[in-house]
Amino acid sequence: MMLAGLPLNPDPVLNQPITPELVKKHGLLPEEYESVKGHLGREPTLTELGIFSVMWSEHCSYKNTRPLLKGFPTEKRGATAAFGRVLVKAGEENAGIIDVGDGWAIAFKIESHNHPSAVEPFEGAATGVGGIIRDIFTMGARPVLLTNSLRFGELESPTTRRLLRGVVAGIAHYGNCVGVPTVGGDVYFDRSYEGNPLVNALCLGTLRHDQIRRGKATGLGNPVYYVGAATGRDGLGGAAFASRELSAESASDRPAVQKGDPFMEKLLIEACLEMMAVPGLVVGIQDMGAAGLTCSTCETASRGGSGIEIELDRVPQREAGMNSYEIMLSESQERMLVIVQAGREREIEAVFEKWDLHAAHVGSVTDTGRMVVTHHGTIVADIPASALTDAAPVYQREARRPAYLDRTSAWTPEASGLADLDLAGALSALPRLLAHPTIASKRWIYRQYDHMVQHGTVVLPGSDAAVVRLRLGETEKFIAISNDCNGRYCYLNPRRGAQIAIVECLRNLVCAGATPLAMTDNLNFGNPYKPENFYQLGECVAGLAEACRFFDVPVVGGNVSLYNESPEGAIDPTPTVSVVGFVEKEAHVTRQFAPAGSRLVLLGGAPAELGGSQFLGLIHGLKTGDAPAVDLAAEKSLQDLVLGQIRAGRVGAAHDLSEGGLLVAVSEMLFGPGSPGAAVDLSRLGAPRLDALLFGESQGRAVLAVAPADEPAVLAAAKAAGVPADVIGEVTPGGGLSVATARGALAWDLSELRLGWEGSIESAMKRPGLG
Amino acid sequence: MDIAVVQFPGSNCDQDAFQLFLGGLGLPTRYVWHKDRDLGGADLVVIPGGFSYGDYLRCGAIARFSPIMGAVREHAAKGGLVLGICNGFQILCEAGLLPGALIRNSSLEYRCMTCELAVGDAGPSFNPAALGARVRLPIGHGEGNYRIDEAGRARLAANGQVLLRYVGNPNGSLDDIAGIRNEAGNVFGMMPHPDRAFERFHPSQDGLAVARAVLAARFPEVARKSA
């Protein structure tokens, strides 16, 4: 037997020869395996093969996306020391950090847990939350809020209902117990996600500038500690699992899904923050997320330009008889790696004793540049740390414009002979749209999340953006956060769809009274080896990068999730974006609920666009046309106008126009406290088609509720900004929703509309789901 | 006045309760750790919300055996004031300091929302007069479904021990019970969160009045001063 060049391992399983089949099973290409041998100067051991396999997976290495991501702006041009300066850039660490002034900063990041959630929705979603929280407190920040971005198939499907129930319960289980409020999110239901739901979780934390910690192993001889939960056989090779397509056999991957323990995470948060508060104690810290002990050791060594050696016998273990392959690849949750200043071992141990957690001294920092792992007195891995990180392969994949785009982008209602709505059609379309789960109230979901713990939530879930009060030492600051991405637009026009995700997200923030600061993104796509999928990925990233530059919103980190395919094909491209905004004064906090007596002002006009709308999908069963047009400059004028009017104190409520168009937006503004009604007149808007006027999803638009006395000033400001502004009606104390159009009058009973909107998901979830 | 907020390792509303009393009412407030055995002469002990020791077994089932709970029992036996909020209420029931038990919500789901509550006639120890007929407080729990046997239910009614009842029952609680006191009138427990209803941007500020109502009978001057 040809051995690896390292000593014979006492465990015969680990001495098996590395065959091409074994290499393939580990998801490495033959040429990648040749490169592994090149880095080692010999054949790898089985443990080393496993280590390369997870570190060179897409999940850890971004090997197919790194060149694309370089296009993102990572710094804010207009930043000041008090506002939006990027302190830790994307890709440097576990999460990006931006300055919010007075010596304080926020760390935030979004990450996917799509594949685990498809196979085991409860644990998959729960551990997704746990993982992203660790990414934040490993930076030294106290987690203060969570959001999530979810995508499912149609709710009619029992499988979707099982997945939705499990994912929501999993997020609730984890987030509620650790005591970080889940303050917002977005959820879409579309057939393309059938069998491959998306579960993207975001966490944001606060810290002082001097509390920022790095994932670096430095200082020759400094001890390396393993803290938190013991290692078990769960989550073996999860990162590699996330880098494959889902198939009928995926259910047998269940051991690759981790099991979470939010109580353990709560202890770990408190113990780590307490430890990091001790001056000079912690040299570096990194969570053990994807690829567990492997990733945390080689990344800290690589970032520190040092080396690291660890002894697996000292790793706390849940089960007897685990071999080095299993220990290194385990993705057991709630574990961290900490590099401590030599001589201060007792101090870290005391903190972890207080919290009844493991703190095991497992190794030390070296200057060899290598990651050396021993087990039972035998070296089981000896790899240059940089070979696993910086030297991981990078590919420029082939891109090909999908053939369907010719057909869909050429579609127009006129060319296809699509009849316009008559009044009866319009009457029935609005309640149907409001009750579609993508548009309907998400109350069934968010009432299961503790969205109030930490007593800082200002705008509760259900408005355009969540607003949270941050208590920072003696001061307090207000931030807003929103997630967005309409995959349907990205399918029909990847570049433009991605831009719409950003502009809509920014509009949501602005309507809440916030100035956008910075963004984190989660790129959810299909298999990048299929040129059509890679085309969508490249176009979406280019669109995002352009819009980010235009709005001066830097990308401070994110996540890439590829291989989102089920046997039916790839998901709609879904580059989820999440932007954090800064609310200057509490008085600027604005909600979408219109007070009675105010006038409704439509900003941005009424262009006749129907492509990619929920209306086309729901009423005509069509996913076609081009995505709505995006004019970044016009969008900017609109947003500056809205924010300016809010700051001038002239806006009673603001709501952006998105899925479902104008009438859905107006209805949603009336679903607040006091249950007002509205008399709307659209007859002077001069629209060629009634369907596009009422339900088209043209961008760059918002509706403001303005007190009559403020109306002239708002209209004058709009005129000065070059933003079309039309007074379309007024909010009445009670009564229904009446809409005059050039074709005749429409009227709805608002309580009926509200009932359908509020109860749609809840009543669907009362129907039996599978399992 | 000395208010002690107990911190179990899984408490997560400890800071909320702390801020309610310190920031909201302006009263001297401090934390005590679950491994401590001494309350240091506190006038009011607050057991906050959260998941004490994970609560995977049954809410509060482990917490009742913790070192600090010995001190809380002694404090209560001597007539000292105790307030349990949410998980704190569950722990007080498990510890036998309050009658009854809290089981899984009838929906089998966690509920976070703001509830309308009818104030019970639990005076004089709870001072309903200062609260008015109704208050609005948020809830956030998966196991807030209050249960008690028939004899206990009759005693609650006879002694006027019900502090708050849900108007629109969110969890299946018997008789819409949201909060109770013990017979002696010094131990209080409630699922709703006064510690989420005191800042100007909260759904209501009724948490302040509820916290004062707990203090009113014993410390009328403090309750008045912080009003």
Image: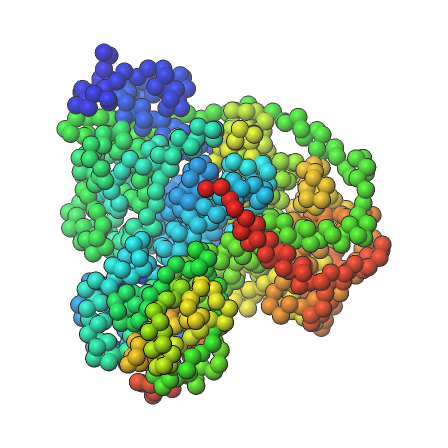
Residue A365: in sight, yes or no? Answer: no
Who is closer to the viewer here, A632 or A622? Answer: A622
x then y, percent, for residue A301: 29, 35
Residue B220: in sight, yes or no? Answer: yes
- Residue at the far right in the pictured view: A743
**Which residue is at a point 29% across and 50% down the rendered structure image?**
A264
- Residue at the far bottom in the pictured view: B221
x then y, percent, for residue A311: 19, 34
Up-down relation of residue A524 to residue B13 (above or below): above
x then y, percent, for residue B67: 19, 64
Quarter where residue A251 is shown: top left
**Which residue is at a point 69% across and 54% down the rendered structure image?**
A431
**In this figure, which colouring scheme has been used for the structure?**
rainbow
**Which residue is at a point 43% across and 86% down the rendered structure image?**
B129
Quarter where residue A670 is shown: bottom right
**Which residue is at a point 38% across and 51% down the rendered structure image?**
A174
x then y, percent, for residue B5: 29, 69
User: In screen coordinates, is A743 left or right of A558?
Assistant: right
Up-down relation of residue A375 to residue A207 (above or below): above
Quarter where residue B179 is shown: bottom left
The mark total stands at 0
Up-down relation of residue A657 to residue A522 (above or below): below
Who is closer to the viewer here, A550 or A729? Answer: A729
Who is closer to the viewer here, A82 or A642? Answer: A642
- Residue at the far front in the pictured view: B150
Instruction: Give the quarter of the figure containing the N terminus of chain A.
Output: top left
User: In screen coordinates, is A325 left or right of A136?
Assistant: left
Who is closer to the viewer here, A686 or A451? Answer: A451
